[in-house]
Image (spheres, grey):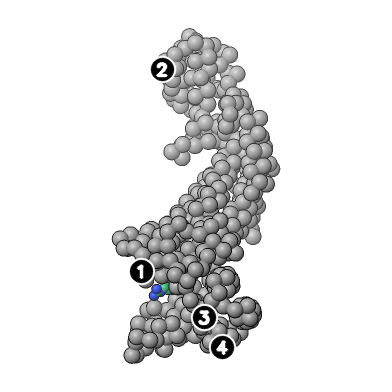
Amino acid sequence: MSNGLWGGRFESGPAEAMAALSASTHFDWRLARYDIAGSRAHARVLRRADLLTDAELTGMLAALDALEADVVSGAFTPTVADEDVHTALERGLIERAGPDLGGKLRAGRSRNDQVATLFRMWLRDAARQVAGGVLDVVDALTDQARRYPDAVMPGRTHLQHAQPVLLAHHLLAHAQSLLRDVERLRDWDRRAAVSPYGSGALAGSSLGLDPAAVAEELGFDGPVENSIDGTASRDFAAEIAFALAMLGVNLSRVAEEVVIWTTAEFGYATLDDAWATGSSIMPQKKNPDVAELTRGKSGRLIGNLTGLLATLKAQPLAYNRDLQEDKEPLFDSVEQLGLLLPAIAGMVRTLTFHTDRLAELAPAGFTLATDIAEWLVRQGVPFRVAHEAAGACVRVAEGRGVGLEDLTDDEFAAVDPALTPEVRDVLTVAGSIASRDAYGGTAPPRVAEQQARVERRIEEH
Ligand code: ARG
């Protein structure tokens, strides 16, 4: 392999294994169109610095247009001799503009500032796409919340029955965390929106090139403050890798619930046939593969984050070739989410919830015990005493194998004389849910308001 970029001081080309190790076109070709956009902007600042004539700029832009068309059509592709996307595209440019003109574009830029810029551009577009996919999942959750506004279910802590809640309240809890993921991607973009182009290899450009003009043309808010930082830092990549891993973890929690909810034991919900798989041997099976793959891939997204952080740690400033390892983990995370998000949105949107089953289970496991204690507090009983009394009611009911609402007046009075028959007012699931009417609580009007706010946030994005 001969190398078009640095022949001068070398007597031989790289060894085959060296070239094989070095090559990155099999993954960084994704950056090709961003590289060409960067080249256009760079050509314009070269013109402004009088390093290209008007005619040369016109010729350069025409060659870049032709190159882009060939990249898009597939007529131009990297060869094994091209180390990376930048090398390949420079070869393509020279083939189209000739060596004299084509060879002028590299002045004042380095692959180090190029790649840091293009990777940011690619990630910024990817972040917007991922956010759109997440909003579809949020929309599927709110759709379901709208479909079952009155359905109740046993809310759980430690997976044990805790207190009854509205199904819509539970679904919106997932919507909230996913909306934070969307907002995290937006926040990230503000920090990522600075362009390293013009940093050169590390020290900046001596050719009078304007980094702000390039930044603006490429859609950034401005150029980086420090050319060393611009070429050396990858915290923008690690930060979005975290945002994507966190998203994966949040999706995985939705997924895990779907796995549990669709078991025979829970029977909360049934998967739509289009979003389930069967078994090659057991004819009865309907498996929640979408949910399981979501759970599995979230581990992969975490791996991509931790792998990247490990790559970055202990690298001295500025650019080191280790940094070439920054791209595959992010390409992978974005690609996996591109597969996952539409599938999980479809799965969630088409779940059928079994509201009778959910209602039957809502009071099971003495989920109304807190309501007895809080009713006593409203009668002036100290909570410590009320908690004891409600616990004693559970003990009596459990001993008799009945629900709390089945205790007799005498049994209540024997536990605590303050437990008059009126306590039965709160011993219904509907009463319990309606009573939790503080902001953010599970009472139907509060959940309806929350739903409206969530839907507004979906629209605002
Ligand atoms: N392909 C490299 C990367 O992705 C950029 C090339 C920089 N190479 C160099 N020898 N300075 O990081």
Sequence order check: which comes first, mark 1 or mark 2? 1
- Mark positioned earlier in the residue sequence (3 or 4): 4
**Which residue carries the number 1 mark?**
320
Mark 3 vs mark 4, foreground winner is 3
Q: Residue at x 53, y 76 (%)?
A: 51
User: Nearest the camera: 312 or 64?
Assistant: 64
Q: Tell me if 407 is positioned left or right of 22 in this view.
A: right
> Could you tell me the amino acid type at mark 1?
Asn
Amino acid type assigned to the residue bearing label 4 in the image: Gly
Indicate which disc, 3 or 2, sits on the residue closer to the N terminus.
Answer: 3
Q: Nearer the viewer, residue 365 or 36?
A: 36
Q: Which residue is mark 3?
A: 104
Q: Nearer the viewer, mark 3 or mark 2?
A: 3
Residue at mark 4: 98
Residue 295 visible in this rendered orientation of the protein: no
Name the element at disc 3: loop
